[in-house]
Image (spheres, helix red, strand yellow):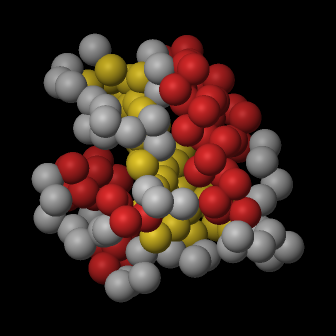
Amino acid sequence: MIFELIYRSVMSTDASPSCVADIVRASRGYNQQHGITGLLVFDGEKFWQLLEGDCDAVVALTNRIERDTRHRDFHITHQGFRDSRRRFGNWSMAYALDTSGEFAQAWDRSTDPELASLIEQGAMKLDIDKALEL
């Protein structure tokens, strides 16, 4: 079984959008060392992140993330175990920048597990592969 946790937050007013690249780079190294995979979506203001892996490792990482001053209004919206495979097992941290507004619209009308399923199935037009070139 895989533990899955999803949170939402808002970029701090004193943080620069360029810090997101630093977050993704650091996340990839840390996550690879700790067996964590997932996806971070950023729309220029809001973060949405799904983390998956061993429960203790994901919870420890989430505690670190929650204390990060580059964002505020941190809120866990979903957590629990999944019987199936990882959703984003190919990436220590996939990243997508939502410039279309499609994700933000879906955010307002879907639960977070539904959003994760839409992304996993490719039903949303998030350009994950291009964004991985950071």
Location of residue 22 in the rendering, given as x and y in whole percent from the top left corner? 69, 54
In-image side of 27 versus 117 (left or right): right
Q: Quadrant of the C terminus?
A: bottom right
Outermost residue toward the right in this view? 14
Is 69 placed left or right of 40 in the picture? right
Q: In this view, does 86 lie above or below 76?
A: above
What residue is drawn where x is 55% and y is 38%?
28
Q: In the drawing, does residue 36 fall left or right of residue 84?
A: right
**In the image, what residue occupies the spot 72% across and 63% down?**
19
Q: Which residue is drawn at 47% across and 20% down?
A: 35
Q: Is residue 72 visible?
A: no
Residue nearer the viewer, 75 or 29: 29
The spot of residue 57 in percent (x, y) is 56, 19
Q: Which of 112 and 133 is in front in this view?
A: 133
Which quarter shows the N terminus? top left
Question: Image point 78% across, 43% down: which residue?
Answer: 67
Task: Name above or below for residue 114 compared with residue 31.
Answer: below
Residue 32 in the image: above or below residue 47: above
> Seen from this angle, which residue lies furthest front?
133
Q: Where is residue 10 in the image (x, y as percent from the top left)?
A: 64, 66
> Could you say which quadrant of the image residue 96 lies in?
bottom left
Residue 15 appears in the rendering? yes
Q: Residue 88, position in %: x, y?
A: 31, 39
The correct choice, above or below, for 107 with respect to 62 in the image is below
Foreground residue, 130 or 117?
A: 130
